[in-house]
Image (cartoon, rainbow, N blue to C red):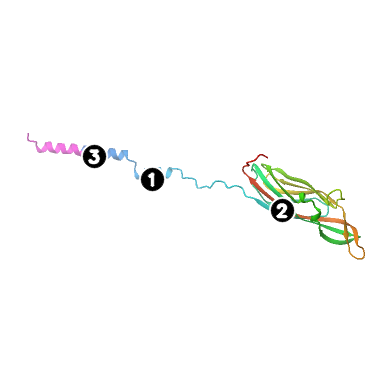
Amino acid sequence: MTRTCSENKGQSSALTLIFTCGLLGLCLLTPSAEAQLTSATARPAKSTTAAPSIPTTETWEFDETTTGGNIVWASPTGVHSTSPFYTVQFSIDAVEVSASWIGIDLGFFNVIDQVPPEFLVNSLTISGPAPLSLLNIPVEAPPPPDPIAIGATISVELDATGHANLLASNIVLGTFDFDTGFPFGVQTVDITGFRIAGTVMITPVPWRLLPL
């Protein structure tokens, strides 16, 4: 059968229409480049924030002198105040007394050898969080039954902000025998004050293997 020119043109127009509709459908089904970019940028970025680090140890030195009044000292910095446990190390590194005899100032004397060793170094682990009492120890030199030359109750606390606070109270200033040299020899002298210096070290502990 012989087709006419008009029939061929009609078939060509139909094919063109079908092809155009197919392209339009493909465009509607495929997201645009802008939509893909918007979708990619809308995804939440991965967090780059590092996990919280384990709280670090703080070490403080104190050096205080009294002539009979209480000693009050506070640490310049603090530790993590909500830790479940703390390890505490407290050491007394120097104990000196000032003395006088018949009104003569004799200066300071090192008497740390008169303090019992168990009072010089303390170490413990204690449950948190802050505030809490870390230490409360009586210090006497020389130890009983000898008469007390110097005495104090030393307490260390960790306040709610993580700062250490030291208090030396119940101060006792007594007497001790001192060799004044020739020609008076050993005499009982009056203690007019004392100096105490040491170190407080506190480490927050996030967990503990053994029970308290």
Task: Give the vertical position of 82 relative to 183 (above or below).
Answer: above
Q: Residue at x 29, y 39 (%)?
A: 26
Q: Position of residue 107 (x, y in %)?
A: 83, 61
What span is colored magenta in the figure?
A: 1-16
Q: Position of residue 38 (x, y in %)?
A: 40, 44
Q: Residue 20 has which mark?
A: 3
22 lies left or right of 197: left
Q: Between disc 1 and disc 3, whose residue precedes? A: 3
Q: Residue at x 73, y 54 (%)?
A: 198
Q: Residue 37 has which mark?
A: 1
Type of amino acid at the residue the image marks with label 1: Leu
Type of amino acid at the residue the image marks with label 2: Thr
Q: Residue 199 has which mark?
A: 2
**Secondary structure beneath disc 3?**
helix
Q: CA distance from mark 1 to mark 2?
A: 60 Å
User: In this view, which residue lies farthest toward the bottom?
Assistant: 182
Nearer to us in this view, 72 or 190 = 190
Q: CA distance from mark 3 to mark 2?
A: 87 Å
Q: Nearer the viewer, mark 3 or mark 2?
A: 2
Quadrant housing the N terminus: top left
Categorize mark 2 by other alpha carbons within 10 Å: few (<14), some (14-19), many (20+): some
Q: Position of residue 116 (x, y in %)?
A: 79, 51
